[in-house]
Structures are given as C-alpha cells and as structure tokens.
Amino acid sequence: SCCLLLAVCSPADDAGSAGSLPLEQVSGEPDVEDLEWGSGSSILHLLHSFPADSPFITETPEKPVNCTQRFWLPPSTPICWENIAGPEEFAKSRLLVLQNRAALQAVSTSSGVEEGGVSYDYQAREEVQGIRSEHQKMVETMQTMETVFVGLAEKRKEGKDMKEHLANTRDAIEGREHMANHLEKQFSTLEKNLLNMQLRLSKFIRQ
C-alpha cells in the first residue's frame, strides 16, 4: 500500500501562526472561518473523512505512518486557506482514486493475475516458450513430411524404371516370338522340301 502525505503551511507574512495549526484544525472540527474562505472544513477533517483503506493518511509525531512507499508533494509556494482545494475537489479526487482502484482490480481480475500470483513477465515467458515449442513441432512435422515426399518420389522413380524395364522385356519377348514364328515357317518349308526330295528319290529308285 502507499500513502500520500500532505503538508499545510500558513502564509509567509503570518509569522505568528507559522509552524502550528489552530485548535479547530488539529481537532478535525470545521471552522467558521473555513466556511467563509470557501474550504468547507479543515484539512484534517477532510483527510479523516476518507475511508481507512484510502491512500490519504495523516501522520503525527506521536503516531507515525508505516508505509512501504511515500509520495511527497513537490515543494511549491505555501498552501494557504485562500487557495486550498475545497470539499468538491477532494470529493472528485477521492472518486477518481476509487475509480482507478476499481479499474485496476478489474484489469487484474480479467487478466487472471492477482496479488501475489503469477507475474506478467512469467506469463509472457511461458507463452513465448509455448510458441517456440509449437514452432519446433511444426518444423519436425515439416521435416517428416519432406522425408515422406522424398521417399515417394524415389519410389515413383523406381516404379517408372521398372515400367521401362517391363516394356523392354515385353518388346524382347515379342521379338523372340516373331523370330520363333519365322523359324517355324522355315522349318515347315524345309520339311516340305525334304518330303519332295524323298518322293523324287523314291521315283528315281523305282526306275
């Protein structure tokens, strides 16, 4: 949690009241002169009107405020009752603080990150690691598919070579069949010639 410490000082020309607050301001009760000056109530009364969990917390020497972070207002001209913020400005500031707190809580709830939970950096690292793992799996899958495609191309090439070999073998078989038919015709012609010669020899012997 954090707290905002406000410092209130008197005008520079009012040396008698510098360094101390009136009794009405210390007690937190509204002052009549405050109403005339337009502030509505004392600064301590306005600060005490905030809830306990408000970042606006007053600090006294007897009761110091234990904050992990302290946001001090930058040094500026002395703040006087004439130009101090009125109750409307404080109400607007308180409303803005509560709205910002509700918005931060809504963002924290919607993002799934609660107080003391997993940090955004860790979640981002986990997401990057998951993306890298998925990318690695995709690369391995692509390499496997490429290997399969190369194997299919080689098998297709082997099948083409085998088809060519079968075609050549078929041509050779057809050539041999043609040659066998030709030889068969020659043997038939030779057989006829031998039969004619045998008949002639028989006639010649008979004569």
Image: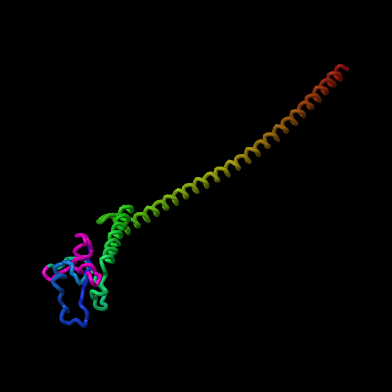
Q: Which residues are magenta?
A: 35-62
Q: How many marks?
A: 0
Using the rendered view, name the quadrant where residue 28 is placed: bottom left
The majority secondary structure of the magenta stretch comes to loop
Q: How is the image coloured?
A: rainbow
Q: Nearer the viewer, residue 25 or 134?
A: 25
Q: Position of residue 27 (x, y in %)?
A: 14, 68
Q: Nearer the viewer, residue 206 or 57?
A: 57
201 versus 81 height, above or below: above
Q: Nearer the viewer, residue 121 or 153?
A: 121
The outermost residue toward the left is 62
On-image quarter of the C terminus: top right
Q: Position of residue 6 (x, y in %)?
A: 22, 71
Q: Position of residue 34 (x, y in %)?
A: 21, 71
Q: Residue at x 15, y 81 (%)?
A: 16
On-image quarter of the N terminus: bottom left
Using the rendered view, name the quadrant where residue 33 is placed: bottom left
Q: Is residue 206 left or right of residue 127?
A: right
Q: Residue at x 15, y 74 (%)?
A: 21
Q: Position of residue 135 (x, y in %)?
A: 42, 53
Using the rendered view, name the quadrant where residue 125 is placed: bottom left
The outermost residue toward the right is 207
Is residue 204 one of those drawn in magenta? no
